[in-house]
Amino acid sequence: MKLLAPYNLAGLSLNSRVVMAPMTRSRAKDTVPDRSTAQYYRQRAGAGLIITEGSQISQEAQGYLFTPGIFSPEQIEGWKQVTEEVHKDNGKIFIQLWHVGRISHHSIQPEGKAPVSSVDTLAENTTCYGVAPNGQPGQVQVTRPRAVSPAEVSRLSQDFVSAARNAISAGFDGVEIHGANGYIFEQFINGGLNTRTDHYGGSIENRLRFLLETVDLMAEAIGSQRIGLRIAPFGRLSAMPPFADEKETWLAVARALSSRKLAYVHLSDQDSLCGNLLNREFLREFRDAYQGTLIFAGSLTKEVAEAMLSEGLIDLAAFGRPFISNPDLVERFAKGVPLAPFDRATFYGGDDRGYIDYPLYHG
Ligand SMILES: Cc1cc2nc3c(=O)[nH]c(=O)nc-3n(C[C@H](O)[C@H](O)[C@H](O)COP(=O)(O)O)c2cc1C
């Protein structure tokens, strides 16, 4: 089976093509990964590649309480435990670098200020996890953001560079830029939202400038082969509107990244959340436009993943929810044994229940 065959990811030997998709679990009490985090990832080290939950690159980048960061010495130390544990079992692990942009609340922003974005447009009917008016953690309507100046866009890129350096010093094999799900990069790329009139808004080239400048600076700092990018073409999460040249924009991303020799591009289909957005025709076009390793995620089963690999549509297949309840997912695929169901109630927050207590298969 192709899914279980090894893969050379820019010099990194993966023992299979099964990737663990990034999943926020909201269990980092002081934004610092702890022993449970390390155990959780070690249990899943049998994956060809683990991509961690989204991890904020600065305090301003945070949109949800209890998500881990990768900017303070304590956070870096916490992540070191995680990478050491995963590497003990010969696992490979990238960290997802996250800036939520406008999907945040003043209660968790530095000095209680407004979050930042490309423009000052509020994400209506959109919540994040902050401090509610009663002083307790809870779902709150996100705060209207302020638009960053061009100088601040450069500062944002630098924050990504610092986080990437921190990730390498914490022992990660690489980093994944979170360019999906309506967060900071989509807030620049989306032509329906980004109405800036400077060189970060307007044409496709201008809307991609922040992303590509960031990628290039990070590549100078840690090497392009250690950088992956996750995107969700046609994604509607976090109040992303449709826009005129949407398909052209995403194919332009593919072409621009082809020459940059990244570790991979990771396409996230929000099928389970927003309807089937990435069809085969688009995937084929994207594949032709992007010369490099392509990962796909979104409601995959072993069979669908195998078919997509065999058709040559993708190189690696990412699984999210199945990895929550099946730490030994690759072994289960290999043995052809049934998958354990996941419990949505324990996806986010809480304690070790639903986190590190899913058993291995005993057949
Ligand atoms: C609990 C949970 C948390 C998630 N957190 C993230 C995240 O931090 N970053 C991200 O890019 N996607 C995140 N996702 C999306 C997953 O990476 C994946 O794309 C999605 O679950 C679809 O794959 P699946 O059908 O195999 O679960 C999350 C999904 C779930 C279920």
Image (cartoon, rainbow, N blue to C red):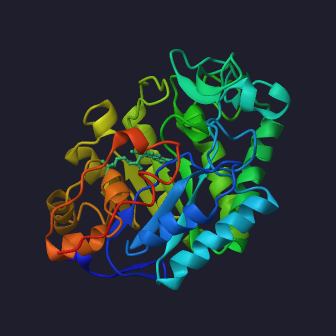
Is 313 left, or right, of 234 in this rendering?
Answer: left
Q: Quick one: quadrant of the C terminus?
A: bottom left
Task: Report x, y in % for residue 230.
Answer: 48, 52
The quadrant where residue 196 appears:
top right
The quadrant where residue 346 appears:
top left
Task: Report x, y in % for residue 352.
Answer: 50, 54
Q: Quick one: quadrant of the N terminus?
A: bottom left
Is 184 left, or right, of 362 in this rendering?
Answer: right
Is 45 left, or right, of 202 in this rendering?
Answer: left
Residue at coordinates 58% horizontally, 32% vertically from top-left?
Answer: 187
The quadrant where residue 223 appears:
bottom right
Is 113 left, or right, of 249 in this rendering?
Answer: right
The answer to which of 54 and 44 lies nearer the viewer is 44
Residue at coordinates 59% horizontally, 30% vertically from top-left?
Answer: 129
Whether 338 is drawn above or below 198: the answer is below
Task: Report x, y in % for residue 246.
Answer: 41, 33
